[in-house]
Image (cartoon, helix red, strand yellow):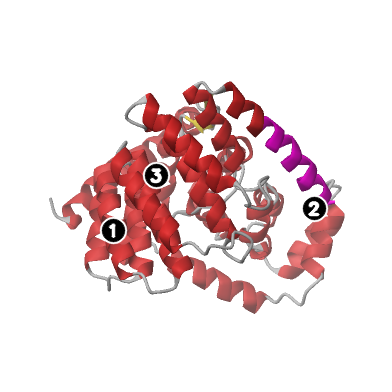
Amino acid sequence: MSTADEQDRLLREPRIALERARGDQATWADLAYCGQGTDEGRVTDRNRAARFAVLWALQYDRHPHDLPLLRFLLQQQITYYREAVPSGLAPDLTLAGFLVAEHRQVEDLWLHWAAKNISFDTALGYHLYHLLTAGIAASIEAVEASSHPDHDRVSAAITAARHTDAAVEEWLDQQRTLFPADPADEGLQAWAHHAARLGEREASRLFMTEWAAGETRSDTTLNTLQFHLARLGYLAEAVEVQKEAVALSDSWPGAKASKLLTLARLQRRTGDFAEAWHTLQEVQRVLPPDKHDVEQGTWRHFVQECFLLVPIAPDPSAARRLLAASEQDLQGIPRLWMDGVLDAAVAAAEHTGDPQALHRYGVLQQAAARERAQELG
């Protein structure tokens, strides 16, 4: 199927869902945040894909009467991020914010402020100009008249710099380019990410591989393609892309070691112990011998990956040998409280049933915790 056919198919259900939401507000319950736990201890949102489908359809079909629906969707996104997204910021939140901001209603200022204050990442990435699209003078007046608990913080944020209505308009124009009203103006990368949010793995893979086929096979292109394929679960394909990236890597040992570590990680995730171990041996050959130099972080990641490989060793004897080798490489690496290396060591010792190793790693964890407390003060 061509990308054009996939795009038409992909938009069909979101458009139907949008018309359903427009026609019956009772259906909004199916778009509300609905948290549920996973076996890994994470929290997911059962309605996230359905909510994004309606939000995405609204991007291409904008009407004044949709503001109540848009406000509802933005509030649900805020709840989702607060409950299930400890870090990061993606277009599912910024799109909802932009579509509300485009209506320029001053009463939405506090809704945008809530979105901006979810986390460190949203504080940086959710632009203050969301709050100012009704006009700076009107926004300042609304804040001054408010008894909101964050009145002083918002007032300071708005008045601290010389914001202008012209700058806000320029930002809105940039957002309109980022979130075009015509699906034909979306790039294949955007289509790939939209498809992934809807749970359409194969369509997402198609769009991203088509995008990469039209790009220079640079580090940036290969890294983007590899990461996206791995995130979708196409690990074997991600391995092949990363092998290409390793082949293109320059002579700087740090860059090559980093790419090889990514390859080993992917090979481990596919369950290929032999290839992952072979790649880790290549990593060790290009690592600097001094574990205290600027590449010490790479040494930690290398040893962590060795420990993580222990549970998929083909037999108990191989697992014990790898555990012993990993412990040997662990010696002399500073800042063992970073990067989860000792957690991986403990898990490897538990897998092999080695109580002495477990005791040693427990002692190291206690010492690392003390070092962390001293270093961070």
Provide the residue designation for mark 2: 375
Q: Work out whether 202 lies above or below 353.
A: below
In the rendered structure, does residue 204 fall within the stretch colored magenta? no
Q: Would you call the spot at circle 3 few (<14 residues within 10 Å), some (14-19), or many (20 or more)?
A: some
The residue at the point 44 percent across, 47 percent down is 55
Q: Position of residue 206 (x, y in %)?
A: 23, 52
The residue at the point 32 percent across, 53 percent down is 192
| Residue range corresponding to the magenta coloring | 362-377
**Is residue 234 visible to us here?**
no
Q: Amino acid at mark 1?
A: Lys
What secondary structure is found at the residue carrying circle 2?
A: helix
Q: Amino acid at mark 3?
A: Arg
Provide the residue designation for mark 1: 243
Q: Are marks 2 and 1 in contact (CB under 8 Å)?
A: no
**Separation of disc 2 and disc 1 at Cα?**
38 Å
Q: Would you call the spot at circle 1 few (<14 residues within 10 Å), some (14-19), or many (20 or more)?
A: some
Provide the residue designation for mark 3: 197
Lower sequence index among marks 2 and 1: 1
Q: Position of residue 79 (x, y in %)?
A: 61, 37
- Decide if residue 282 is on the left or right side of residue 77: left
